[in-house]
Amino acid sequence: MPITVHQFPCLSDNYGFLVRDEASGQVATIDTPDAEAILAKLGALGWTLDLILNTHWHPDHAGGNATLKAATGATIAGPEEVTRIAPLDRALRDGDTIMLGETRFDVLDTGGHTLGHISYHDAADGIAFVGDTLFALGCGRLFEGTAEQMWASLSRLAALPGQTTVYCAHEYTASNARFALSVDDGPALRARVDAVFAARERGEPTVPTTIAAEKATNPFLRAPLLRPDAATAAEAFAEIRAAKDSFKG
């Protein structure tokens, strides 16, 4: 049976994700940006939290762990780096699997934003939760990792099937779109940007996205095409990432 994903805004620009395995009724939260908002959504849905899956240690992703653990008794799993701010019941690393009822999540190393960042791929349902590694038309800042590490992580995600639904953790798409237009003027990007701006004008989310959409229009995944003179793909990515870091548009 499939999973149900309930997405909702929280904090200033985060998304919360509650995931229910329909076969068992077990429920997970992907990250814990706002414990009170998550508890309120659980109550409104009539769901009971069984599992917390962290992508990385930043407070807007793991800061609600202790409150949710105390309120629900949920098991907490995530990369070892999460212990910098909260305890874990199970440390996860690349190649591990973790089950939510009958739903299997494969753990992917997607470091770069932080050194230990991981993503969760539900291959059976064609869904990936990617935290702050990949955004709609963007990618995470390199707070801890290198451009080579992040390019490897983005390439790993880009290798997933094109129809994979990608849940990224922030509503950054309009800002990302303005930058994308500064480095790429292709018709596919322009059409997508128009759709993004229209959606935001209507107050609609631009998350989730798909791997296919990002490969077609995301300047970070397209870096080697946009910077063909770079010595390596990672260097092309580094140039685009540096341009985004200084972009004032």
Image: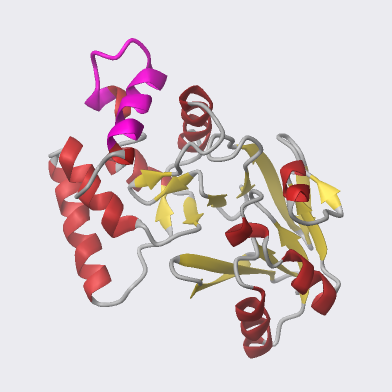
Residue at the spot 30% in from the left edge and 77% down from the top edge: 203
Q: Name above or below for residue 1 compared with residue 142.
A: below
Q: Which percent across, then down, holds residue 95?
A: 73, 34
Q: Name above or below for residue 229 compared with residue 4.
A: above
Q: Farthest residue to the top: give it.
A: 231
- The overriding secondary structure of the stretch rendered in magenta is helix
The residue closer to the viewer here, 59 or 231, is 59
Report if residue 39 is visible in the image. yes
Q: Name above or below for residue 88 compared with residue 159.
A: below
Magenta-colored stretch includes residue 229: yes
Report if residue 1 is visible in the image. no
The residue closer to the viewer here, 165 or 218, is 218
Among the 4 quarters of the image, the one containing residue 162: top left
Q: Which percent across, then down, holds residue 23?
A: 74, 69
Q: Which residues are magenta?
A: 225-243
The N terminus: image quadrant: bottom right
Residue at the spot 39% in from the left edge and 62% down from the top edge: 171
Q: Which percent across, then down, holds residue 73?
A: 86, 72
Magenta-colored stretch includes residue 64: no
Q: Which percent across, then down, holds residue 216?
A: 29, 40
